[in-house]
Image (tube, grey):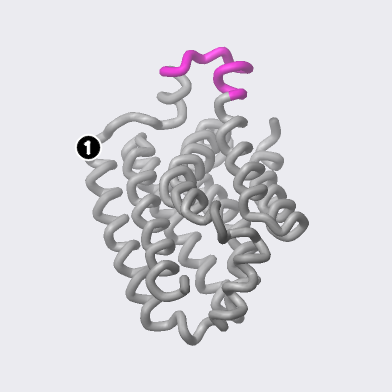
Amino acid sequence: MTLIVLLAAPTLLIFLGLQVMNSVPITFLLFYGWLFAVPFVDLMLVKRFTFSQTLRQLGFGLQRKSIVVGLVSGAIYFLAILLAGSLFLPLLFEKAELERLLVEWKFSGELFWWLVLVLVLVNPFLEELYWRGYFFYKANGRFAQKKLILLSSFFYSLYHLLSVVPLFAWPTPIIVIIAVFVAGVSWGILRAKTGSLAGAVASHIFADAGIILLYLLYLRS
């Protein structure tokens, strides 16, 4: 599978789920299905690695430095998100319009808390597995480490535009995407320096938890 497909497919699936089908649950099935299936099908069925070998190639291993740095950076992201949101959210969008859009996307009703759990627990794991695990494995040797980190962070950030552009007034989406890109770079550096995804996953969980808590505290009726 070419790197172009690996880079572009997540954005295309988000576009199909959100903009074409207008459904967060369908988007999750398409997007997370790809992030999970592609690495394991490639490594276990095509490359014939064992499960433990696959996890090792993807960077799953408990490395103390990685975990410590991940927890500290995650706590910083968590607090920064809550602080920035509490100060500026009322200036960024109309609450009624946001609620209307989330209902249209089916991010509401009986599925709401299940979708929240997916965002906080499943999303960080699968995004890190794909971008800082599998993509690092596939592109290793084709790019210098700095270019690899920047390239993965750019395409990781790209599909976030599809969700933030409808939610926020300009130029806020650009500010949000820059923040997502910076976080992606920091997780890429952490993965590269320690050889482990553990810290990136931990930090990512904190960041996503901050976003969800912000929504629950200030936006959800």
Left or right: 87 as drawn, with respect to 62: right
Residue at x-position 69% and y-position 44%: 9
Q: Nearer the viewer, residue 23 or 1?
A: 23
- The residue sitting at the front extreme is 110
- The spot of residue 136 in percent (x, y) is 50, 37
In which quadrant of the rendered view does residue 193 lie?
Answer: top left
Left or right: 3 as drawn, with respect to 71: right
- The answer to whether residue 9 is magenta is no
In this figure, which residue is indicated by the disc labeled 1? 64
Three-letter amino acid code of the residue under disc 1: Arg
In which quadrant of the rendered view does residue 104 lie?
Answer: bottom right
Residue at x-position 66% and y-position 38%: 3
- Using the image, determine if residue 162 lies above or below residue 205: below
- Using the image, determine if residue 122 lies above or below residue 81: above
- The spot of residue 38 in percent (x, y) is 61, 31
- Can residue 7 be seen in this snapshot? no
- The answer to whether residue 44 is magenta is yes
Left or right: 144 as drawn, with respect to 63: right
Q: Which residues are magenta?
A: 41-52
Q: Nearer the viewer, residue 29 or 161?
A: 29
Q: Nearer the viewer, residue 92 or 173?
A: 92
Residue at x-position 56% and y-position 13%: 48
